[in-house]
Every structure is written in structure tokens, then in C-alpha cells.
Amino acid sequence: MVDSITICGAGFKAPTDAELSGPLLLQMVEDMKVELEDHQQSWREKGCTIMTDGWTDRRNRTLLNFLVSCGGSTMFLKSIDASSHVKNATYLCEAIEEVIQEVGEENVVQVVTDNAASYVAAGKLLMERHPKIFWSPCAAHCLDLMLEDIGKLEWVKSIVERAKYISKFIYNHALVLSIMRQYTGQKELARPGITRFASNFLTLKSLIKSKAALRRMFVGEEWTSSSYATTTAGIDVVNCIFDESGFWTPCGETVQVTEPLVVLLRVVDGEKPSMGYIYEGMDRAKEAIRSIYAGDEDKYGPIWEIIDRRWQNQLHRPIHAAAYYLNPAFRFRDDFKADEEVLSGLYTVVQKLCTDGTASRTTIQLDKYNNREGAIFSSSMCIEARTQLQPGRNICKLKILKFMAYAF
């Protein structure tokens, strides 16, 4: 802002408060409306997803935010004050329905909310009232809940608590923190993640990377000559740092087990559309965890049980299976699995979206897609684009499939 003002020179006259809050603000609103017209046009061409999120502001008001996502672009639509309402399934469903009518019901493919019980009930009610619209829980929230559940396992909980104890001790004492940074080359132990529970496991990973530096630190003169070295807390931390089997070994195991889920969490919480990657990502995460334990079901079984419980009861939806099937990056790989679950999800989506007589045309297009027939699906340009372009932007999709893929 300052650079822009200096470009104008010494004669620049700043707008008044009245101008900023009046005509200039109104002009900005109009300019933004024009800019958003392109977004709104894309809803009609490609379909869209409505996303809602509740939060409480500093005045303790309960607010609901509504956003519209289409083709990787997200637009904030509005925020409503729900403080005077009970946020039960009926109210939430009606609030979402109001937004659906504003966006255009014919343009909405999916509604995404968090996993609170009231939102889950609202989602079910919404699909009953609007048979062509899918409801899905937030993938990032579901993955965070998986990490939370894994964090409740006794052996994992113990390691996370000990890691927090070490981190808090170091960061709560300026001298100890200074010594630590000296030995780690200014690298930090606390690693903020996408979510609170992801942060816990990223901190464990950071501790492992700094293991050698921390051991050198706690035998160095700077530490041993400090007053903290003789405190109970200081002695406990040192004992933990040099406890190979009791701390570092399970710490490494925890990081290995949770890393596949943290990686997937980054994918679904990123800027790019991720619907076409969730189904495959969950399979990859589970297989990675099984390989860590060399196929020993007694060890990987409890982790899989946690993942499956959240996946089957919350996150797994037909729309995820369809998006997986319509992602050329996976569909045309030799190890692609078109099992009954995937095909069932695909045709459930086709039946819901194609109620205007286009189901048969879609089936024909799917056959061409599967068999890589015609100039569109068999061209070298299309084949090259399979793994290089995001689903929905891939040039080898026909009209109906493109609509479905963009919506995902």
C-alpha cells in the first residue's frame, strides 16, 4: 500500500473516511460482483459443491459460513448469524436449502459439512428432500478424527504426552530454548500442522529429526552448568531423551503409522480438488500401515479398525468411488480395482445425476472411456494428460463425464 502511494507522488490526496466507507466501498462491491459472475457461470456449466462451516466469534455469536466450490475455485457466498436458533438438523437443513435455492438447485451436486451429529442428520434430511444432491462430511475433519482416535491408543497416548512434556519444558524456559536452537541449527521442535492432532504427530517427527542434536545438547556444558539441569523436570526430560526403547522406538513407530494419514490430510486440505484422490488415498494409507508391521494383523489390525470405522460410517460415499473411477490417473493404471463397491458407487452417482434421460448416453460414454475408444480417449495428447492434469480439467472427458468430474 505504501509503495503504491509513493508512486502517486507528493500530491496524492488520501480518500476520506466517508469516501472509503461510502462510494469507494460500493464501487468495490460492484466490481466484485462482476468478477464473481464468471464463478456463477461456471456453476451452471460444471456443477458445484456448497460448503458450510460453523464457528463462534469474539462476541460469542454462532455464525455459519457458506462457500461455493467449482473446478478448484472457491467463492465465499455469505455468513448468517445462528445465535438465536438451536442448531438442530431441521434448522441446519433449512439454512442449507436457502443457499441451494440461491445457487440454483440444478447446479448443486454436493453439500459438504463437518461431522457433528447435527450436521450428519441434516445431511441425511437434505438428501431425502433433494434426491439429486449428495451430502458428504468434510474429508479433512474425518482424517483428523482418525488421528485423534489413534492418539487415544494407550501406547500412542503415552508417547504423545511425553513428547509434549519435552517440548513444553524447552519452550517454557528461554535459556533452554536458546541452547536447543543453538544445537539444532535454529530448527524448531514444535511443528504446526493442518489440524491440532496432525500437529502432535508432526512434532514427534520433528523430535526424531533432532534426536542427535538433543542428545548432544543435554550432555553439553551449556545444559549441565545451568540451574535447570538439577530440577526434577530437567532430569525427567534428560531421562526421556536417552530412553531408546521406552521413548524413541515407539516414537518412530507412531510417526510411521500416522504419516500416511497426515500425507493424505495435506492432499485433501490443499488448494487443488481432491475428490478424485480420497478413495485411492485411503487404500494406499492402509496398505502402507500394514507394510510397516510386515502384515502382522495383530499389530496393524487395531489401526485399520480405527480407520475403517471412520471411513465406513462417515467418509465413504458413492461420490468418492465415482470420482476415483473417473480419475484417469487411476482408471488406466494396471493395478486399477473396479470392484463391486467402486462400480456400485459409480452407477449410484449416474442414476442420481442423470434423471433427465441422459443415463443411457452416459453409459455409452463410460464404455468409450473404459475402452479408450475414439479420437478423444485414444489420442496421445489425452493419454499424456491422464497423470498431468487434475480430474475435471482433463481433456479426454465428454460432456456429461466432464460435468461430473468438475463437480467432484
Image (tube, grey):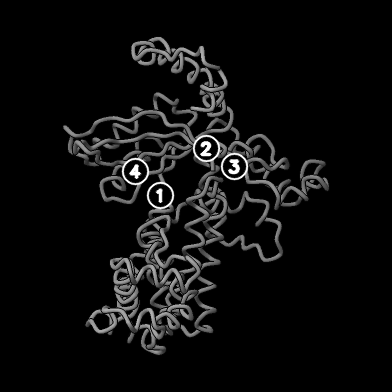
Tag 1 residue: 138
Looking at the picture, which amino acid does disc 4 mark? Gly
> Which residue lies at the image location 24% right of the left edge and 79% below the top edge?
233
Which one is closest to the eye, mark 1 or mark 4?
Answer: 1
Looking at the picture, which amino acid does disc 2 mark? Leu
Q: Are marks 3 and 1 in contact (CB under 8 Å)?
A: no
Marks 2 and 4, the one that precedes in the sequence: 4
Q: Is residue 173 visible?
A: yes
Q: Is residue 365 left or right of residue 99?
A: right
Tell me where residue 67 appears, x and y as whole percent: 42, 34
Secondary structure at badge 1 equals loop
Q: CA distance from mark 3 to mark 2?
A: 12 Å
* Towards the viewer: 191 or 88: 191
Q: CA distance from mark 1 to mark 4?
A: 12 Å
Residue 57, quarter of the rendered image? top left
Residue 402, quarter of the rendered image? top right
Looking at the picture, which amino acid does disc 3 mark? Ala
Mark 1 burial class by Cα count in 10 Å: few <14, some 14-19, many 20+: many
Q: Is residue 1 visible?
A: no
Q: Are marks 2 and 4 in contact (CB under 8 Å)?
A: no
Tag 4 residue: 123
Marks 1 and 4, the one that precedes in the sequence: 4
Marks 2 and 1, the one that precedes in the sequence: 1
Secondary structure at badge 4 equals helix
> Which disc is residue 353 wearing?
2
Tag 3 residue: 405
* Towards the viewer: 374 or 213: 213
> Which residue lies at the image location 24% right of the left edge and 35% below the top edge?
91
Tell me where residue 274 appears, x and y as whole percent: 54, 49
Q: CA distance from mark 2 to mark 1?
A: 21 Å
